[in-house]
Amino acid sequence: MPKRSGNPPWLPLLSGWGDTVNVASRMESQGVAGCIQVTATTYELLRDKYSFELPGVIPVKGKGEMTTYMLTGFLGDG
C-alpha cells in the first residue's frame, strides 16, 4: 500500500472547531458550578431577553483576555 504524505483530507474540517473548543475549555475551567457563562457575542444576542452579571475576564490561550457574562435570569415581559 502506498504511503500517504501530508495531512489527512478531513483535517481542515476539524481545525475549524479549534477556536470554539479552546474557548469552551477555558470557560469551563474558569466557570462557576451551576452557572451559565456566555461569551460577549452570545451576551449581545440575548441581553434584551435575559439578565446577566459581568464576572470579569478569563485568559484564553491564543486570544488573550476574554470578557464573559453569567446569565442570572429571564427578563420576562414585565
Image (cartoon, rainbow, N blue to C red):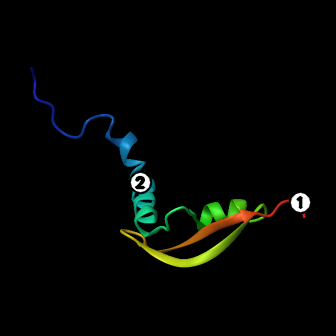
76 or 57, which lies in front?
A: 76
Q: Residue at x 15, y 36 (%)?
A: 5
Q: Residue at x 15, y 31 (%)?
A: 4
The quadrant where residue 41 appears:
bottom right
- Looking at marks 1 and 2 on the same chain, the residue that comes earlier in the sequence is marked by 2
Pointer 2: residues within 10 angstroms few (<14), some, or many (20+)? few
The x, y position of residue 49, in whole percent, is: 78, 60
**Element marked by disc 2:** helix
Q: Residue at x 10, y 24 (%)?
A: 2
74 or 39, which lies in front?
A: 74
Question: Mark 2 sits on what residue?
Answer: 21
56 horizontally vs 71: left or right: left
Numbered disc in front, either 1 or 2: 1
49 or 74, which lies in front?
A: 74
Amino acid type, mark 1: Asp
The x, y position of residue 26, in whole percent, is: 41, 65
Amino acid type, mark 2: Val
The quadrant where residue 19 appears:
bottom left
Pointer 1: residues within 10 angstroms few (<14), some, or many (20+)? few
Q: Quarter of the image for the C terminus: give it.
A: bottom right
| Residue 37 numbered mark, or none | none
Q: Residue at x 61, y 77 (%)?
A: 54
26 horizontally vs 70: left or right: left
Give the vertical position of 74 relative to 9 (above or below): below
The x, y position of residue 52, in whole percent, is: 68, 70
Question: Mark 1 sits on what residue?
Answer: 77
